[in-house]
Amino acid sequence: MTTVLIVDDSVVDRKLAGGCLKNCDLEVAFACDGREALDLLAGDLPDVVVTDLQMPEVDGLELVKQIRKLHRHVPVILMTAHGNEEVAVSALKAGAASYVPKKNLSRDLEETVNSVLSVASSERAEQRILESLTSVSMKFELGNEIGALRPLIMVMQGHMRQLGVCDESDIVRVSTALQEGLINAIEHGNLELDSTLRELKDNTYQKLGDERRKQEPYASRKAYVTAEFNREGCRWTIRDEGQGFDPASLPDPCEPVNLQRVSGRGLLLIRTFMDEVSFNDNASEITMFRKRTQP
């Protein structure tokens, strides 16, 4: 049966809130303050928590923070009273799902609880489906605008999280490598911009890039991205339509003498953050693989 935990240091208010839910098909449990609520949460988890804000020891705001930290999928509804509006706003920002003014409990609490439970149930069902996801494959065709890369990378990050490929810090590192590969394909592949132009102080690199985005044959070139996610890891292949180059001609970016050079920085990051990196014969296509690191 669906369980609601009501938390309030006032016996009268606990009974009032519980009475508002007597006609619901719910099992109602009670805690006299935030500390007792956390102790109960360490055992059987309720489906939703309804809490007062002003309580001794662990107040409602701290309770919300702890629940979000320890039991993220358990939603919290606030019971607010006149005079604690600022605390209520802070609690909502900290992760509370909704609120009901105490003066309106008899009118609104049942509806609010049912509404939050409905949303939470849908989210849990979606999470269970996503947990059964074993692989995802995607293909993208991109123009030469760097601004399109951020939303693409956000999509990639979402799939890495869904499949538990790596933790958040590694997701940032992998995303950095992926972004460098995409930028290389657009700027050095399709637009044929020389990295050494970055060292000039007159924005030559940026100006030439803007010009070539409007000139043929550069303007119509595309970057093609294939992404494959599974329980073993992630593989990306990025192909541009530029002239290509001999990858063996690149100086080793890991050599100390080359660390301060503009060229090669992106490749250094890619090789550092990815587990496997390979090119086709003319380096117009790069394949990057990141192994799963999460247990």
Image (cartoon, rainbow, N blue to C red):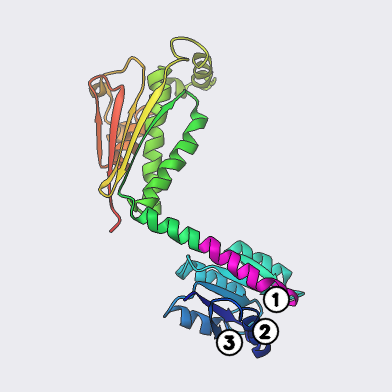
Q: Which residue is mark 1?
A: 105
Q: How many marks?
A: 3
Q: How far apart in space, not on screen, are marks 3 and 2 (Cα)?
A: 14 Å
Quadrant of res 131 = bottom left
Q: Position of residue 79 (x, y in %)?
A: 66, 74
Residue 32, magenta (yes or no) = no
Identify which residue is drawn at 64% across, 68% down.
111
In the rendered image, the residue lying farthest to the bottom is 11
Q: What is the three-letter code of the residue carrying label 3?
A: Cys
Name the residue that disc number 3 marks: 32
Q: Nearer the viewer, residue 192 or 70?
A: 70
Q: How would you classify the magenta stretch by its main secondary structure?
A: helix
How far across and down, in percent of the image, does residue 101 sit? 72, 72
In percent of the image, x 42 and y 45: which residue is there? Answer: 157
Above or below, 197 relative to 253: above
Circle nearer the N terminus (3, 1): 3
Identify the residue under disc 2. 16
The reply to whether residue 96 is in sight is no
Disc 3 from disc 1: Cα separation: 18 Å
> Please, what secondary structure does the residue beneath circle 1 have?
helix
- Magenta span includes 116: yes
Q: Nearer the viewer, mark 3 or mark 1?
A: 1
CB contact under 8 Å: marks 2 and 1: yes
Give the alpha-carbon distance from disc 2 to disc 1, as whole Å.
8 Å
Chain-order first, disc 3 or disc 2: 2
